[in-house]
Image: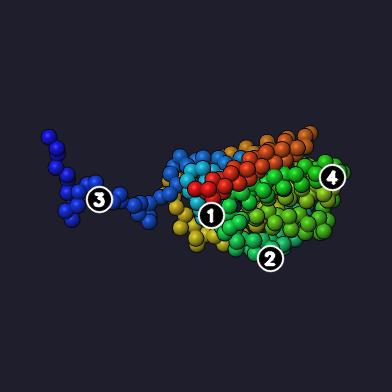
Amino acid sequence: MKLPNKRDSRGRSAAQTPPVAPGPDEPAVSMGQAAVLGVVQGLTEFVPVSSSAHLNFVHARMGQGRDLNFDVLLGAGTTLASLVYFRREIRDLLSADEGRRLRKRILLSCVPALGLGLLIHRYEEKPPLSEPWFNGAMLALAGTFLWWADARGSQERSLDDITPVDALVVGAAQALALVPGVSRSGATITAGRLRGLNRRDAAQFAFLISLPVNLAAIAHELPRLRAAKAAPAAMATGIAASAATGFWSIGFLLHYLRTKDTAPFAAWRVAIGSLVLLFSILHHFERSRS
């Protein structure tokens, strides 16, 4: 016997009733996704592999567009990790006598971010900067440059030897790193190595100069954070995951660079970037044929 079609309030059959679209206030990032994104942020923010590119890839794999507001929240987690990890260095920097010289160098390195960084930030969510193929190309290109600079750089200079020119060069590299795929730590470590800093101190200076820029960026984006497409619990999960894994990755990288070079990170960047670029090209051809 054929069952009669159920009718909705307008007299349409169930088969004719269109599916209900998600409401505009429905969170786009679940708790599990927030945890994954937080771990990705924490693991890739400090090692020279580009956190923004990896977040773009993961967002795309989850079927999402990049939510820059949510990613800023994840950045707050890794900034918290830096503040906790370098608490003694920060205390020394705030000391009127001991930290005056290095403090001036760190503040000077922030100058390029005010101009070049703000200009790049305006286009960060727009093509081609937000597209996977561009991220892949930048990953591979900047990874090759990281390997070259690390192999070419000396191991002679330390934090105590940093000059105003060094600070401006490394600061300019930090501003350029707003381009997804370049990597802030990768660009600043590369610049430091080209200026003759040893690997560990190049990394430590890179992390220290990122703190004022990160804090300024979070303060600038604070009014927009309410637009992040995630529930408060998901936001807290993402921040906690990025802070915990970020704290671990700082210690790992500084310990690693005492005795080893950045070649494995450069190789990872080239490999992942090349694969993403290849898949993006194949996807483009498939769409053009269909």
- The label on residue 68 is 1
Vertically, is 163 above or below 87?
below
Image quadrant where residue 200 sits: top right
> For this view, does 174 lie left or right of residue 39?
right
Distance in Å between CA atoms under marks 3 and 4: 66 Å
Q: SS of the residue at dot 3?
A: loop
- The label on residue 115 is 2
Q: Amino acid at mark 2?
A: Gly
Vertically, is 121 above or below 181?
below
Which residue is denoted by mark 4 in the rendering? Answer: 153
Q: SS of the residue at dot 4?
A: loop
| Disc 4 packing (10 Å; few <14; some 14–19; many ≥20) | some
Distance in Å between CA atoms under marks 2 and 1: 20 Å
| Disc 1 packing (10 Å; few <14; some 14–19; many ≥20) | many
> For this view, does 75 lie left or right of residue 194?
left
Q: Amino acid at mark 1?
A: Leu
Q: SS of the residue at dot 2?
A: helix
Q: Amino acid at mark 4?
A: Gly
Earlier residue among tags 2 and 4:
2
Distance in Å between CA atoms under marks 1 and 4: 35 Å
Distance in Å between CA atoms under marks 2 and 4: 28 Å
Q: Are marks 2 and 1 in contact (CB under 8 Å)?
A: no
- The label on residue 17 is 3
